[in-house]
Image: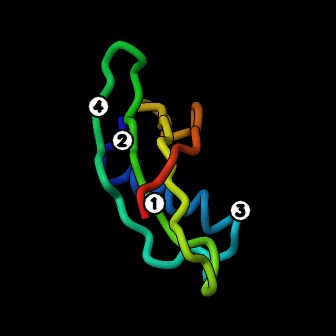
Amino acid sequence: MITGNEAALKVRQHFESVHGPSAVINFIVGNIKKNMKEKCWEVTCSFFPSYGAIKPLKYIVKIDIEDGSIIDQEQVNAKG
């Protein structure tokens, strides 16, 4: 079983692998919520995908509580 902090770290590592380590600028975890019904952590995060980005990307990512795998990710509108 993983903790909420470990789930947030897995989310950051995922976006670094997708966008590159220098592309995940100003990575911010907005919320970490344990969803026992779906047996996952819901991590809300945002980051600027590049140095020239004007608005951050915002995602809600679901992480399996038991093994730490990504179950789902959804990009949502970010206020910026």
Horizontal side of residue 12 vs 43, given as left or right: right
The x, y position of residue 20, in whole percent, is 69, 74
Instruction: Kindly identify which residue carries mark 2.
Output: 2
Q: Residues within 10 Å of mark 3 (few under 14, many from 20)?
A: few
> In percent of the image, x 35 and y 58: which residue is there?
29
For the residue pair 17 and 44, the one nearer the viewer reads as 44
Instruction: Kindly identify which residue carries mark 4.
Output: 34
Front position among marks 1 and 2: 1
CA gap between label 1 and label 3 equals: 14 Å
> In percent of the image, x 42 and y 17: which residue is there?
38
Asked whether disc 1 touches disc 3, contact meaning CB atoms under 8 Å apart, the reply is no
| Residue 46 tag number | 1
Q: Amino acid at mark 1?
A: Ser
| Sequence-first tag of 3 and 4 | 3
| Sequence-first tag of 2 and 3 | 2
Dot 1: element: strand
Q: Residues within 10 Å of mark 2 (few under 14, many from 20)?
A: some
Front position among marks 2 and 4: 4
Front position among marks 1 and 3: 1
Q: Amino acid at mark 4?
A: Lys
Instruction: Kindly identify which residue carries mark 3.
Output: 18
Asked whether disc 3 touches disc 4, contact meaning CB atoms under 8 Å apart, the reply is no
Horizontal side of residue 28 vs 54, given as left or right: left
Dot 3: element: helix
CA gap between label 2 and label 3 equals: 22 Å
> In percent of the image, x 43 and y 77: which residue is there?
26
The x, y position of residue 64, in whole percent, is 47, 32
The x, y position of residue 41, in whole percent, is 37, 35
